[in-house]
Amino acid sequence: MSGESRTSSQVRRVRVEVLAPEMVLGPREARHLYVLRLSPGAELLVFDGQGAQAQATVAELDAARAVLHLGERSEAASETPQPLTLAVALMKGDKLADVVRAATELGVARVQLLVTRRADAREIGAQKLTRLNRIAEEASKQSRRAVTPAVLPPVALTDFQWEGRLFVAQPGSSLRLTDHLDWAAPITVLTGPEGGLTDEEVTQLTTRGASAVTLGPRILRAETAPVALLGAIAALGQ
């Protein structure tokens, strides 16, 4: 079977803790495979969320446990040349879930939640954070990525640290992100809440080395802005 056909949408993708000759899945993943009526001998694609993936074969399966045997390693879908981080202000409702799902599909390595002055929320519960990480895992399966982005607990904007270059979405800026994207170092893109970042917040970030970039001629909603920035990067084929 060719590598292309093995990674087709018909092959189930399962995340495992580590690629090993024999892998044992717990109740959540086992139950999912059991409901799909897979049987011993069925082929899967397993990935560890860190960039490695391989073929695997179901050796044992019931509703509580699955045993997989490792097969040939395969090349994962390409990632960005340097890690790409999305830093995004907290939002209410399911908006964050939509952002995390889209950000995963568009290639981010991690999502850092932020508390900003105008953020819709000041904190996030442990259960919701777990759900966001699960959404990232499911989106990585759907988009055939071997990397599962971590959704990190919120930090205050004043405490936020980043590696490499930081681009801050700011209406009115004349700088275009795609004109300054050289991938010489890790990249972070940051978007604010509904109502935007305050001028003081933007100044604090640019004083620390960030670059303010345009979102285009229109004002975008808080859940649209991160997808617009990441989509612009993805459109470059990186």
Image (tube, rainbow, N blue to C red):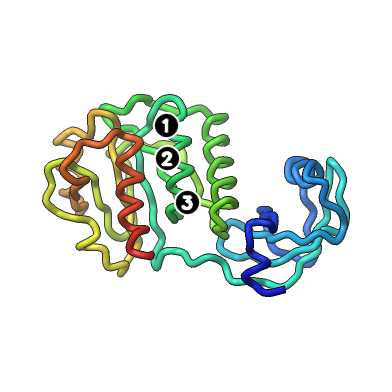
The quarter of the rendered structure image containing the N terminus is bottom right
Q: Is residue 238 left or right of residue 35?
A: left
Can you tell which mark lies on residue 170?
none
For the residues labelled 2 and 1, say whether their Cβ atoms are less than 8 Å apart: yes
Tell me the SS state at disc 1: helix
Picture coordinates of residue 226, whole percent (x, y): 33, 44
Residue denoted by label 1: 95
Front-lying residue, 43 or 207 = 43
What percent of the width, then of the height, locates residue 2? 67, 74
**Which is more N-terminal, label 3 or label 1?**
1
Between the residue at mark 1 and the residue at mark 3, the CA separation in whole angstroms equals: 16 Å
Mark 2 burial class by Cα count in 10 Å: few <14, some 14-19, many 20+: many
First of labels 3, 2 by sequence position: 2
Kindly identify the residue that appears in the image at 35 percent across and 61 percent down: 186
Task: Residue under label 2, please give it.
Answer: 99
Residue 205 sits in quarter: top left
**In the rendering, at what x and y percent does residue 183 appear?**
32, 67
- Helix, strand or loop for disc 3: helix
Left or right of 7, for residue 38: right
Gap between marks 2 and 1 measured at Cα: 6 Å
Q: CA distance from mark 3 to mark 2?
A: 10 Å
- What's the residue type where badge 2 is placed? Val
Along the horizontal axis of the image, is 148 left or right of 10?
Answer: left
> Could you tell me residue 125's position as x and y percent?
51, 27
Q: Nearer the viewer, residue 8 or 174?
A: 8
| Quarter of the picture holding the C terminus | bottom left
The crowding category of the residue bearing disc 1, from other C-alpha atoms within 10 Å (few below 14, some 14 to 19, many at least 20), is: few
What residue is drawn where x is 57% and y is 67%? 76
Residue displayed at 83% across by 55% down: 67
Q: Which mark is residue 105?
A: 3
Instruction: Please name the residue shown 75% across and 43% down the image.
Output: 32
Q: Residues within 10 Å of mark 3 (few under 14, many from 20)?
A: many
